[in-house]
Amino acid sequence: MAPLADLYQLTMAYGHWRARRHRAPAAAELFFRRGPFGGSFALGAGLAEALRCLRAFRFSNADVAYLRSVLPSTTEDAFFEFLSTLDASEVTVSAVPEGSVVFPRVPFLQVKGPLLVVQLLETMLLCLVNYASLVATNAARFRLLAGPDVKLIEMGLRRAQGPDGALSASKYSYIGGFDSTSNVLAGKLYDIPVRGTIAHSFIMSFTSLEEVQPREVLPLAGGEPVDLLALAVSWLQRVCELLQTPPERANQGELAAFVSYAITFPSNFQGLLDTYCVRRSLSHNPTDINPLLLHPRSGLPNFCAVALALQQLGYRAIGVRLDSGDLAKQSKEIRRVLRACGAHFQVPWFETIPIAVSNDISEQSLEEFSREGSEIDMIGIGTNLVTCPLQPSLGCVYKLVEVNGSPCLKLTEDEEKMTIPGIKMIYRLSDAAGHPFMDLMALEEEPSPSAGQELVVRVLGQLGETSRVVPTTVEPLHRTYFRDGQVFEPLPSLTEVRTHAQESLGLLNPAHRRLRDPQPYPVAVTEKLHQLLTTLQQASQ
């Protein structure tokens, strides 16, 4: 597999090779500096894909031939011969398990190996982790706002930045807590549940009942075929009588579309309710409008008629969908009608028919649904999920922390951009309630902290003062995933990563988990690591 790399990594590689430094042992870390979307955390994602690319890392003859054409003509032939033998067999990667909550400045990945290879891997790892973690985090935020019971469907294929972006969005939004995707290819490749029924175009393609062919459907329990169209028309009379609206005002093309779809999928019938508006056909006198039919959609009487006809044959409709208007308000009005039909026609399950919504859903939309109260059971989200418009990049960086046994430090006046030197161990400290309250970075050679032990630490951003903490539990965050050219630890399935992500989010203290103005999560260093940092700072002055 041709490595994903920026040109300057190849020119630096040649520089290291010419200086005979290319085999110097080195270590780098991948992390982000600020919590995305104004929150305190991100979900780490993209690890499995990064490991697969590491295993396949090598330059083919075609790759080397191309590099000869873009590097300066003075580049020695021996360098290209060296590239043709290069792989990741001497690289070791440790990382936070995929789907884990990760905080700013805490390394998601640590990479150790020959300097030239460690630097060549930078862009590939950043490319595979940056968007994956961003969209997984975005999805997790939607899940937190929606609550655990509402079903979330990713439907951003037509809005994503190309097919690769769309597939990544489907995969990583599933990790972040979405239940399904509309993307059929993603379902095939990643075994994600797929969902989808009909669009407005299907309904608009019908204009009259005469277009319904065939008209019959077999009862679920068997027997002779039944004319579903005739049955639905008879039910429409009864529904309209209940709703006190003339049946002739129901759109005939819409009814034909619903019946046609129900005949094709009698066990999976869902009605899209907002293709046609009926306010034009209701009385202009507000006192004449039935409170059961305050919604402006023609589809509900037609849906109820077809769903009740199917019910008579043993089938259950799977839901309704709205794609425009005041979704929260309409969901409550629709629920009143469904309950009325269920009670009047003695069909108890009718009252709980799922109501799905779509239409440019954003975080603000979900906050409004919660604030206003709604009867929404399922939400389809596309553009504002897959394009991450509130923050289009996570901003991960990849920095050297040690070369040839000597710790490296990027020194800057902006403490946020200053790197933390040395090869490190990362520990997550939790309190008696099981909530993580601090991540601690220590030098690799330091003894591991123990639960119940008082620790003297320095919090990043407050390095001038010490703090004392006593953790109830101490968890090493990183595991070794890649060594000797092979994935070192069995990788979990996508569903297992999704479960781990939800468990990881569930452990957070609500103050750190909240999406607006969260309490900053402290990341600290040990006294020994702080002493190393101070020494390197003084040596650089």
Image (spheres, rainbow, N blue to C red):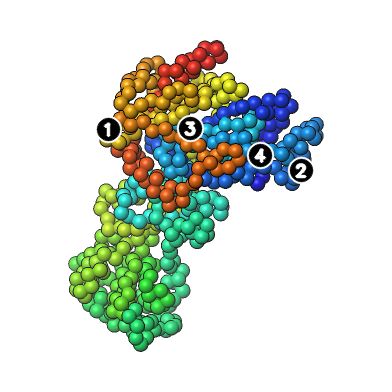
Q: Secondary structure at mark 1?
A: loop
Q: Nearer the viewer, mark 2 or mark 1?
A: 1
Q: CA distance from mark 2 to mark 1?
A: 59 Å
Determine whether label 4 and label 3 are within 8 Å by CB.
Answer: no
Residue at x 52% of width, y 23% of height: 422
- State which tag comes first along the sequence, 3 or 1: 3
* Res 327 quadrant in image: bottom left
Mark 4 vs mark 3, foreground winner is 4
Residue 8: which quarter of the image?
top right
Q: N-terminal of the two: label 2 or label 1?
A: 2
What residue appears at the point 55 percent right and 25 percent down from the top-left corner? 401
Q: Amino acid at mark 1?
A: Ala
Q: Looking at the image, is mark 4 or mark 3 earlier in the sequence?
A: 4
Q: Secondary structure at mark 2?
A: helix
Please tell me whether residue 325 is drawn above or below residue 452 in the rendered image: below
In three-dimensional space, the C-alpha distance between marks 2 and 3, rounded to whole angstroms, equals 36 Å
| Tags 4 and 1 touching, CB below 8 Å | no
Nearer to us in this view, 336 or 439? 439
Give the label on residue 335, or none. Answer: none
Label 3 CA crowd tier, 10 Å (few <14, some 14–19, many 20+): many
**Residue 287 visible at all:** yes
Q: Is residue 336 shown above or below 382?
A: below
Instruction: Please give the residue where the numbered disc 3 appears in the rendered image.
Output: 107
Please name whichever residue, 462 or 472, is drawn nearer the observer in this view of the structure: 472
Residue receiving disc 4:
87
- Residue 336 drawn at (x, y percent): 23, 64
Residue 515: % across, % down = 35, 40
Nearer mark to the viewer, of 4 and 2: 4
Which residue is at the front of the view, 67 or 280?
Answer: 67
Label 4 Cα neighbours within 10 Å, binned few <14 / some 14-19 / many ≥20: some
Indicate the amino acid at tag 3.
Answer: Pro
